[in-house]
Image (spheres, helix red, strand yellow):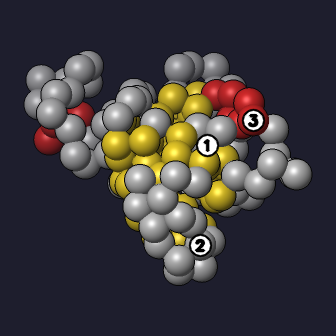
Amino acid sequence: FEKGEETEVGDIVALDIDSNEEKYVKATNPRLVVGVHSDTYGHILGGLESIENSEDSFIPVGMTGRVKTKIIGAIEKGDEVVLSKIPGVGRKYHPLIDSERDIIGFVVETNLSEDIKLVKMKI
């Protein structure tokens, strides 16, 4: 996906609606999420002739499957994920304050740290 800003592994990525071109940035709107910046892929489509030449202009994005995702706050295996207030970072879904439509995946491992960390999520 075409890079609209610097991202790093684990950032949740979305379409940048403020750009006149098709660009992707750290997600702030769940309805525009396309996936997660990933460094674990079996196959890359698009970009330039090699991943090394594509890094300045493109983001390798996992769109389905399990991918390391930035999560803030404690989260347990099976918990659903929504975007946090921090661009590109997810958090645990809370049914009393979040819409089910905003769920972007669920985690497949437990991590009780309250800090931002990488947790495997199924998109």
**Sequence-first tag of 1 and 3:** 1
Q: Dot 3 lies on which element? A: helix
Q: Residues within 10 Å of mark 2 (few under 14, many from 20)?
A: some
Q: Dot 1 lies on which element? A: loop
Q: Whole-Å distance between the Cαs marked 2 and 1? A: 20 Å
Image disc number at residue 80: none
Question: Which residue is drawn at the image coordinates 43% and 49% (left, top)?
Answer: 121
Asked if labels 2 and 3 touch by Cβ distance under 8 angstroms, the answer is: no
Report the mark closest to the observer, 1 or 3: 3
Image disc number at residue 100: 3
Amino acid type, callout 3: Glu
Report the mark closest to the observer, 2 or 1: 2
Task: Where is residue 71? Give x, y as percent.
Answer: 54, 62
Image disc number at residue 74: 2
Along the line of sight, which residue is nearer the eye, 86 or 3? Answer: 86
**Location of residue 46 with respect to 86 vertically, above or below:** above
For label 1, the residue is 27
